Image: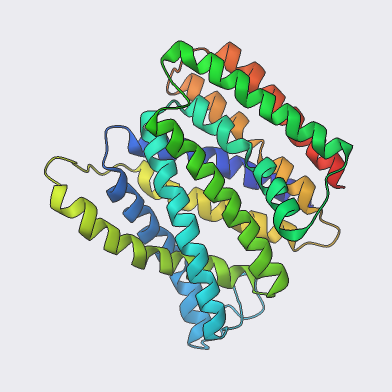
Amino acid sequence: MWVGVAFLSALMLGLYDVAKKRSLTGNAVVAVLWFNTLISTLIFLPVVLDAELSLGVLDGSMLSYEPAELSSHLLVAIKAVITLSSWICGYYAMKHLPLSVVGPVNATRPVVVLIGAVLIFGERLNLWQWAGVIVAILSLYLLSRSSKKENVSFTSIHAIAMFAAMLLGAASGLYDKYIIWQHSLDPLFVQSWFSIYQLAIMSVIALVIWYPRRGSDKFRWSWAIPLISIFVSLADFCYYHAISMDGSMIAVISMIRRFSVVVSFVCAALIFEEKNIKSKAIDIALILIGMVLLAIGSV
């Protein structure tokens, strides 16, 4: 059962990338991201109100949690800063780079998480995991070569933003492990309040950075914008639900979620008509092989 939920999360993640790419095409990045955080907050607002006001409507369901202490809110606020930093970098990269490049790079995030787990939590890699890391690094090298055919340099400012987004996203994943497993925070509490804190921070950023420049950095509404929030909320909800199920294996779930790159890659070819699809398909196959090796070594 948890495997099916994990694959559903992967599907939602792939569609999330597609919705981002569609929304950001010729659009103001900060404004799109602000609407994304607003809609995500509205999605979880009923959950927060029910829990914090003790309404009891959602008690006993998957949409209920116990209110937490102020220290727990501080931990979630820190997560919001880390994740929002990743999203800002990722949105700028997504706007200016092909989806068939951004998606595969982001798919290598588990490699960074694994290395971070070694450095921070003292975990050790076995031969399977080392093989997965090496294959993933090789795939990035090949992807950088095939991307040059589209004049995409991995040393450009947008590519640096892409890698920064991936690294910050990995940091967010490690931080999730820290606050949920070591501080025993309810995943739904984290997801709900994380959205609220993100909206607060993003509102300040939008007022300071985008609003004064709204004449030159124009925003246009797209119905793909609410889909960003819907897909990422569903992806995270399925992820947290999968890891909470009996018998679930976090390493396998993380690997399955990387199959989202297949969804975004197919859409890059069919919807956005991006180039060099065949050569990039080999790179993506290597990335998925690397993720499978990581999963085998982690079971």
Residue farthest along the left direction in this orientation: 215
Report which quarter residue 8 is drawn in: top right
Name the image colouring: rainbow
| Picture coordinates of residue 16, whole percent (x, y) | 50, 42
17 relative to 279 in the view: left or right = left
278 relative to 29 in the view: left or right = right
Q: Which of 202 and 178 is in front in this view?
A: 178
Q: Which residue is drawn at 66% across and 60% down?
A: 240
Report which quarter residue 45 is drawn in: bottom left
257 relative to 192 in the view: left or right = right
For residue 141, above or below residue 244? above
Residue farthest along the bottom direction in this orientation: 54
Q: Nearer the viewer, residue 124 or 169?
A: 124
| Picture coordinates of residue 149, whole percent (x, y) | 47, 11
176 relative to 299 in the view: left or right = left
Q: Which residue is drawn at 72% across and 41% down?
A: 256
Q: Residue at x 42, y 44 (%)?
A: 89
| Picture coordinates of residue 255, whole percent (x, y) | 73, 41
How many marks do you count on the picture?
A: 0
| Picture coordinates of residue 198, whole percent (x, y) | 41, 63
Q: Is residue 57 visible?
A: no
For residue 268, above or below residue 247? above
Q: Is residue 181 visible?
A: yes
Q: Which residue is drawn at 42% across and 40% down?
A: 20
Q: Which of 256 and 169 is in front in this view?
A: 169
For residue 185, above or below residue 97? below
